Amino acid sequence: MSEPVAGSSAVADLEQRAGHLGGTFDFDTPPGGGTRLTWRTPLPAPVPGLSPPDPHGAEPATA
């Protein structure tokens, strides 16, 4: 991953990084206020026999 360029915006960096991963980044202001960020990137193909990591950080059980 490249380092941010001095003087560039964080939004531009996020857009560039999403593009490098084959995805998209968008942001808008929904009705009622706030900011909505949408980051979409493709997931890698699963590897047969390999369990995905636990999203809560738990270590896989060993036999």
Image (cartoon, rainbow, N blue to C red):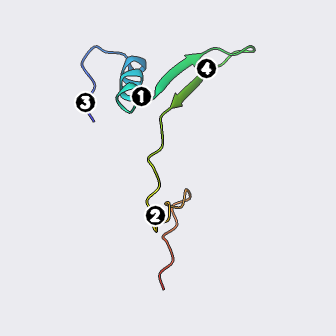
Percent across and percent down for residue 47 are 43, 59
Tag 2: residue type?
Pro
Percent across and percent down for residue 24 are 48, 24
Q: CA separation, marks 4 and 3?
A: 25 Å
Reading the chain from its start, which is encountered first: label 1 or label 4? Answer: 1
Q: CA separation, marks 3 and 1?
A: 14 Å
Q: Nearer the viewer, residue 33 or 25?
A: 25
Tag 4: residue type?
Thr
Q: Are the two marked residues, 4 and 3, in contact with CB atoms closer than 8 angstroms?
A: no
Tag 2 secondary structure? loop
Q: CA separation, marks 3 and 2?
A: 34 Å
Q: Which mark is residue 18?
A: 1
- Measuring 50% from the left and 60% from the top, which residue is drawn there? 52
Percent across and percent down for residue 21 are 38, 33
From the image, which quarter does the N terminus lie in? top left
Q: Nearer the viewer, residue 28 or 45?
A: 45
Q: Are the two marked residues, 3 and 2, in contact with CB atoms closer than 8 angstroms?
A: no
Residue labelled with disc 2: 48
Tag 4 secondary structure? loop
Residue labelled with disc 3: 3
Residue labelled with disc 4: 35
